[in-house]
Amino acid sequence: MISATPTILSTVSSQFVEDWLAALRDLCPEAQMASLLSRSGLVADTRTPNGRVTLDQIACLYQLAAVETGDEMMGLWSRPIRPRALQHLLTTVREATSLSSALYRFSTFWNLLLDDYQFDLDDAEGPLVLTLKPQGDAQVQRFGHMLILKLAHGLMSWLAGHEVPVQAVDFAFDRPEFDQDYAIIFPAPFQFGQPATAIAFSPNALGPVQARSTSDLDRFLQNAPRDWIFTSSRAHTQSLRVRTYLGQTRWEAATLSQTAFAMHMTPRTLIRRLHADGTSFQAIKDALRRDIAIRDLQAGRKSVEAIAHDVGFSSAANFHRAFQRWTGSTPSSYRRKQS
């Protein structure tokens, strides 16, 4: 088995980005939209309901679209977010003396720019909760709600010098079919169908800020949204810890009993905890296999047979069937679509 960083290998379903693509289609002429999708490698991956989208593709489309549309939030909010807004936001929060004051600066900054929503920061007692409150009959844009909460989390983590634990996340929209994609983004319990979209931090997790130089700021901007849209933490959910373990061991040892033993619990306890995360051991294992296979098929340096062996299949035929079940495409046709 290939040892690899699970976060970098993580993918989300094509449905997860469809709200974003819909907003971009409203913003761009057809030819420009086709060009953006082609240059980011997203054309093939959004054609089937089972399509998968990688972090590289999301980052590439964000970097292209934010510049070429003149809107750093790419049509996700009613008012365009003009170029250099993110740079000014980083400059603003960098001057904060604590993580809580940085979150306050984050909220006041966006409240100057957004018309359809306003942020409310509640730190009266208990957790520090940042809530996105609609102004009138505001449209709920699932990708936009995710992205702006994740930006808040990413900036807090950037200032802290480590990924700040999230206590809970609420979304003001119904649970979608692709709800497990949110576990890739937020290492915390999350709920759907709530009165408002919000993210909560425990006061105990809000330590001091680290000094950030201009070069640090420039690097954050250059990497956006790579450094903040996908979680790099494994500490907050059992499913992420299992994925990390599987990503660092050999497939022949990647069994439920071996994994439970490595985590100092019984298989029954592990099953119960994964169920609490809304997943299963086999689902996590298959998702990691799928994401490794997608990476290697896109890279184009290995044969399908070699990839099948690397992800623990006894035959290429078994791998073909599994990959088609995961993505709606055979490995060979998936590779052709990427070229």
Image (cartoon, helix red, strand yellow):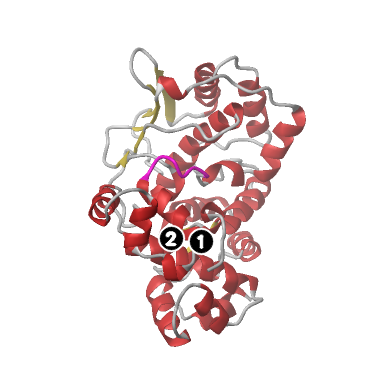
Residue at screen point 67% across, 49% down: 68
- Mark 1 or mark 2, earlier in chain: 2
Amino acid on which disc 1 is placed: Val
Magenta residues, as a range? 232-237
Amino acid on which disc 2 is placed: Ser
x, y (%) of residue 37?
A: 59, 62
Q: Are marks 1 and 2 in contact (CB under 8 Å)?
A: yes
Tag 1 residue: 53
Circle 2: element type: strand
x, y (%) of residue 14?
A: 45, 61
| Vertical position of residue 310 compared to residue 128: above or below | below
x, y (%) of residue 106?
A: 53, 24
The quadrant of the image that shows the C terminus is bottom right
Circle 1: element type: strand
Give the crowd class for mark 1: few <14, some 14-19, many >=20 residues within 10 Å.
many
Q: Nearer the viewer, residue 184 or 262?
A: 262
Q: Main secondary structure of the magenta part?
A: loop
